[in-house]
Image: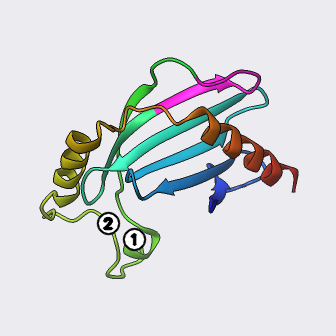
Amino acid sequence: MVYASGGRSGIVSTRPALGRFDPSLNLWTILVDSSASFYTAYRFRFTGLNHLEGQAWTYLKTESLSGAGVFFVGNRSKSRARVNGSNAPGVAKAMADDLAGKLDAARSRATGKTPADAPPAALLREMERALEAVRAR
């Protein structure tokens, strides 16, 4: 399986994170090594050009994720290149049509999948092992 790794603060050794995109569901899953005792899992999808919606769960490393997560929304403001003056991704005064949101709504009706679905336990266990391997480097 292909993952992207990094760190929430930009320093991988302090708060490593591992992410994966599932194109069949149009969902991102990101697992953050939140502390010595906890993981935080994020599951979301982009619902517009610069908008995302999903849920987050924080759970003990010795346990499995359970229960409803906390809903969140996010907005990408500007990429580094846009901030530096290049014609690159970032928020503009005029937004494009929300085609992604329309496609997600159609997919949700067809499959019953929504951003609120918790990541499967098997996926989280696999990501936890990979995240621990990144931390051990």
Rate crowding at label 1 as few (under 14), some (14 to 19) or many (20 or more) other CA atoms within 10 Å.
Answer: few
Residue behind mark 2: 90
Q: Nearer the viewer, residue 106 or 132?
A: 106
Closest to the camera, between mark 2 and mark 1, is 2
| Residue ID at (64%, 37%) | 122
Of label 2 and label 1, which has the lower sequence position?
Answer: 1
Q: Amino acid at mark 1?
A: Val
Q: In the structure shown, which secondary structural element does the residue marked by tag 2 occupy?
A: loop
Contact, mark 2 vs mark 1 (Cβ under 8 Å): yes
> What residue do we see at 36% from left, 79% from top?
85
- Asked if the stretch drawn in magenta spans residue 58, the answer is yes
Q: Taking 101 as reference, is 135 left or right? A: right
Q: Tell me the quarter of the picture where residue 70 sits.
A: top left
> Mark 1 — residue?
83
Q: Residue at x 27, y 50 (%)?
A: 47
Q: Residues within 10 Å of mark 2 (few under 14, many from 20)?
A: some
- The magenta segment is 56-65
